[in-house]
Every structure is written in C-alpha cells, then in structure tokens.
Image (cartoon, rainbow, N blue to C red):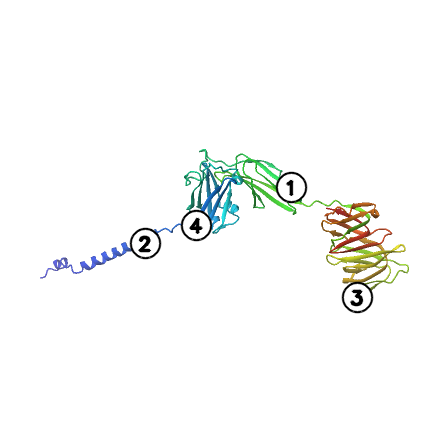
Amino acid sequence: MPNNQNSFLNNTQAVSEVIGEVLLTAIAVLAFSVIAVSVFSYADPQEQVHADIQGWVDVDSDTVYLRHAGGERVDITKTRVLLDINGTRWELSSSELELVKGSDIWDLGETIMINTSDLWSQSIGEDDNVAIIMLTTDSNLVIKSGTLLGEAQDVTGSSGGGGSGSNGTTPTAPVLSGQSPLTPYESNTSTSVTFSATSSQASTNEFLLNGQHLAWSNGTSPTYTNTTSVDGTYTVTLIARNTVDPLLTDSLTWTWTVTTPAPVVSTGTNMVLQKNNKGGYVADGDYIKFRTGGGGGGGSSITINGVTTGIPNNRDVMLVMNGQQNTGEIDIGISGGSRRITTYDFNVEFYLNGVLTNTGDIDSIFISKADNIESTLTYYLPSDLSTTYLSENGGSNVIIDWFPANGSEITLYNITPSNSINFRMEYDASHTYIAGFDADYSIN
C-alpha cells in the first residue's frame, strides 16, 4: 500500500513557482517605491532673477545709483533693497522701491536713484562705507550684493524685521504727536497749508493724499506744504516708519476740505465795461422780462428763424438764453419816458404771457414800449492780462483804468438798463463793450 503521506510531503514541484512570484512582486513594489520617492520628493527650483545690476555712489548728492545693465526684466513688486551705510542698515520695501523708481518694472538700461538724504536724512561722505544687497521678496534670493563705496563689508546679515538696530537695541515703532493743523481742517482754494507733526525718533516719513504718495520728509519733524485750486474734501495721511524695521509704524490723518471763497459783490449804477481783445459770455437760462406798454404804443414784434410773432400791448414777454451765449448784441434805447428794444441778437426761448411761443436765433426785434424790465442777465469776463476799463456813476468812479494792464476775472450780475440812459451791450471773442447799465459785480 502506497504511503500517500510521504508522497505529499515530498512533492515540491510547485514551490519554485510560488517563491518566484513572491520575489517578482516584492521587486516591483520596491521599484515603484523608489520612483515615487524620487519624483514626489523633488522640490521645484526657486526662481532666480538673472540680471546684471551695476551700482555706484555720488557723494555730492547723497545718491546711490543702481543701473540695470543686462539680463531679464526685474519685477519691482517682488524686490527689496538693503543699504548698509557705516554699519547702519536701511531698507526699501518693494512698495517704497516702486515709489522711488516710479514704476513696477525695471527694464534694461533704466537707473534707480536712491537719495539717502531725502529718504532717511542720511548723508554720504567720501570716507563712508556703503554696501548693498538686493533680494527677491518671495524667496530671498540675492539679485545683487556688494560694496559700492569704501572697504568690502558683509551685507548678508539681518535686515530689521524684528532684528536689532545698529547699536544692538531692539527697534521700536515711532510715536507721532503735535499734529498741526488740527483735523478736520478747512481752507480756501490757492491757500497754502502746511501739515506737520513730531516723531519720537528719526523715522522715515511719508505723506499721502487720498492714498497716493506725495512726498518724503524724514527725521523727527515731518512736514509737507500743499496748495490746491480744486474744491473738494481730501484725506492727508502721514506714515512714520522705523528706519531699521519699516513694519514698525505710526500714522496721523487729516480731513482737509477746500472751498472756493464766495466773491465779494458790490453794486454799481450807470456802469461801463470795455475790454478790447477779450470777450466773455452770458450763461444759459439767464433772461430779460418786460411788459409791452399800452397807450397807442403797438406795433411790437419778434422774428425768430424767419417766423414773425406780433405782440399786442399789455403782454408779458420773457426772453430766456437758450444755451451759453458767446457772442451777442443788445440795444435798448429811450423813447420819451419809455424803453424801446431794437436789437436782441441771441438764441432764446421766447415766452408770451408765460407760454413758450418759439425757440431759436432772433432775426429781428422791435418792442416799441418795454415797461417793468426785469433781468437776470449775468456776464462773465474771463481773466486776460490786457487793457481793461470798468467804471460806475457815468465814469466819475473808475474802478479799473485802462493802464496798467489788468488780468482780473470780472462778473456782472443782474444787468439792467440804467434810468434815462441808452443801454448797449456788444461782445464776441475779441472785444467787450457794455454801457448804460446797473449791476452787481465782483472782481477776482
């Protein structure tokens, strides 16, 4: 009888195949593991800026020059500069460097000028040591480093940002005080205003107007003077930065309102205004209003764009300026004890008894009798330095004489014919002549 147990124990026909499959599987797993480790542990290379930056110092103007002499374009928004002057570390952040450069891109051939006196009240002498390091802000890779003036120095040390100052002390934020003028502040256009404060340390001080850079005023007494002729409300901000660590700051803000002063208006009678080489304009919407007289004074009419409208006695007439009138002529004479209108050369809206009757250029007008004349006519004569004549009271009071030349801006309000005097108004781009009228006036 065969011994089946021994036969089973001694049968090794499939052992080599099983062991082979196990070994192959192990080898495959190890191979894929090595590849995965190699691939996924490989870090992306840090982007290096390849640019040739040349640097030098002009001690006469306390200016450090950095010139892009070759290589690729430099992104200023990702670049900061450290300057070491006799062991004192100064830093320009990317935003500050952009303000100095005036652009966020630095191309081949362009030069950045860093004036240390303006920025930090730091002068540079012939015997001083000046070193520089230029870094990328995202990876801190060096773009440029070295000594620009004096003996070679180590420029790779700490750059503020919580480090120590040149004397080994920990930098602190400046404290601003003594804000002048107090906020809110109001001034008139063309008035010079000086904004100032006191800093507890020699800080890097920047003034901004509505968030836009205005000027640097470094040291312990930041100050800025501004004059504006534009009405509006502005925000003036002063930011003081520690010179070692620009992240340590203090700030003050002014709310500044600028307004145009109201004109000083005087009243004149029987006036004359004449300017030989400058004309003004009458504003849109100004009007003259009157009532046609009775008592046999009929025959009045107005012709606009070829259409004639007869105007009976005792009718209310209003002529409204249709748009700004840069040229025109008016003749209002005397007929007995009444007014007679013979010329009114403008583009108007013509109202008769309150009803709009016609609109356009007046071809001709004849009002035999105009009573109760009411006027809002305002004449604006822009500034022009030339001979000008303005008088009142029939010339007995000369306000502006022909000589010397006068460049004032003159405005006449509510121009109305004077009593018992012929009124004439004539002007275009080259001359002004108005006589025989009463008006309020301002001279600026």
Image disc number at residue 192: 1
Residue depicted at 81% across the width and 55% down the height: 424
Q: Which dot, 1 or 3, sits closer to the camera? A: 1
Amino acid type at image mark 1: Ser
Residue 144, x across and y down, in percent: 43, 45
Closer to the camera in the image, 208 or 61: 61
Closer to the camera in the image, 32 or 423: 423
Residue 31, x across and y down, in percent: 28, 55
Amino acid type at image mark 3: Val
CA gap, disc 2 and disc 1: 71 Å
Q: Which residue is mark 4?
A: 51
Q: Residue furthest left?
A: 1
Amino acid type at image mark 2: Ala
Q: Which residue is mark 3?
A: 307
Look at the numbered disc 2 and give the secondary structure of its residue. helix
CA gap, disc 4 and disc 1: 45 Å
